[in-house]
Structures are given as structure tokens and as C-alpha cells.
Amino acid sequence: MKTKTNRPLAALFAAVLTFSLPALVQAHDAKTHDATAQHGIAVTGAWARPTIAKMRISAAYFQAVTTGGEDKLIAAKTANADKAELHQHIMENGIAKMRPVDSVAIAPGTPVVFQPGGYHVMIMGLKGPLNEGDSFPLTLTFEKAGDVTVNVMVMKKAAQGHGNMDHGTHKH
């Protein structure tokens, strides 16, 4: 006897799960969003890629916006790694290169998206692997707002749903 599978139902379930992920991530990060907004900075959607094999390096991505005056992200740190640096991918002679940056300006009401191929926090010398589903704290230091700690979720790729956000001065 052949078992009949319900492929349309399975496809619907997969689609619902896929498109629900941004809401789940946003809901999970809501507490962080509320806490960081008190400092005049809102940081949402923090995520990092899992490490591969024995690699001890990853990158953290998120969105930051100031709810007050202009500010600058000037540093990052985590107890889970030896070092965390602010980086940006740039195009130089047609070649994409990653470079450390001293700071990232955050203009009032204009979200800055830290994403693959743009600004990100490079996490080096991880003290253990980052597995999908894990999370870790990352402290972001702003020039005026001071330290803001966010919970970074480890996932294979970013949750979609940033819509038509302004990426500020970021260029792909």
C-alpha cells in the first residue's frame, strides 16, 4: 500500500515557517529593543553565522538606530571571544575587501543596517563553536549612549523582512 503524502500542506507549512521567522526573531529581540531604547539607541535583529569545523571566527549583524541625537558606534566586545572589531566591506579596484573601521555614525531616525557585505562586527578568537540555535551577549559601545548589550542569535542566514530600509551611507 502506498502512503499518500500531502505535499501542498507540507509546502504551506514550510512557507509559513519561513515567513514567520522574522516575526519570531523580532519577538525574541523585543526585550532587547526596549532595553536599548532607554539609552537612546535601539538595536534589533542581532544574529551571527554558525562557525564551521574548528574555525574560531564569525561576524555579528544587526540594525541600529538612535532615538535621540546623532551617535557613533565605537567598539564591541563579547566574553565569548578574544576580540570584536567594527568592520566594513569596501570595493577597491573591483575587488571586495574587508577593512576595520574606527566608528560607524548613527544618524537620528535613520537605521544603519549591519549586514553581510557591509558593516558588521568581526568576532575573532571565539572560545568555543557557535552552533545554530545558540545565542551570546554582545556589548556595543556608543560614543554618547555608552554600552548597550544585545543578545545575538546564531543562525545560518539572516531573517528577511527589512523591507525598504534606508541603509544610510552604506554602499554594496
Image (cartoon, rainbow, N blue to C red):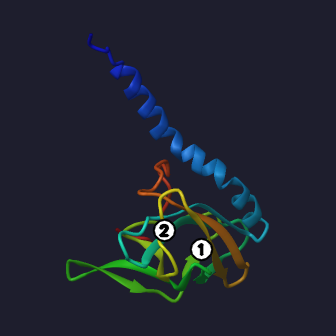
**Quarter of the image where one finds residue 151:** bottom right
Q: Pick the residue in front: 161 or 57.
A: 57
Instruction: State the image coordinates of residue 167 (x, y, percent, origin top left).
Output: 47, 64
Q: Is residue 170 visible?
A: yes
Where in the figure is residue 154, as x and y percent of width and height?
Answer: 51, 61
Looking at the image, which is closer to me, 133 or 61?
133
Q: Position of residue 34 (x, y in %)?
A: 75, 59
Residue 106's disc number: 1
Q: Residue drawn at (73%, 56%), measured in percent from left and top?
A: 31
Secondary structure under badge 2? loop
Camera-nearest label, 2 or 1: 2
Q: Residues within 10 Å of mark 2 (few under 14, many from 20)?
A: many
**Residue at image location 41% in from the left, 57% down from the top:** 156
Mark 1: which amino acid? Ile
Q: Is residue 112 visible?
A: no
Residue under the image location 70 percent in, 61 percent down: 32
Q: In what element is the residue under mark 1?
A: strand
| Quadrant including the N terminus | top left
Residue matched to label 2:
130
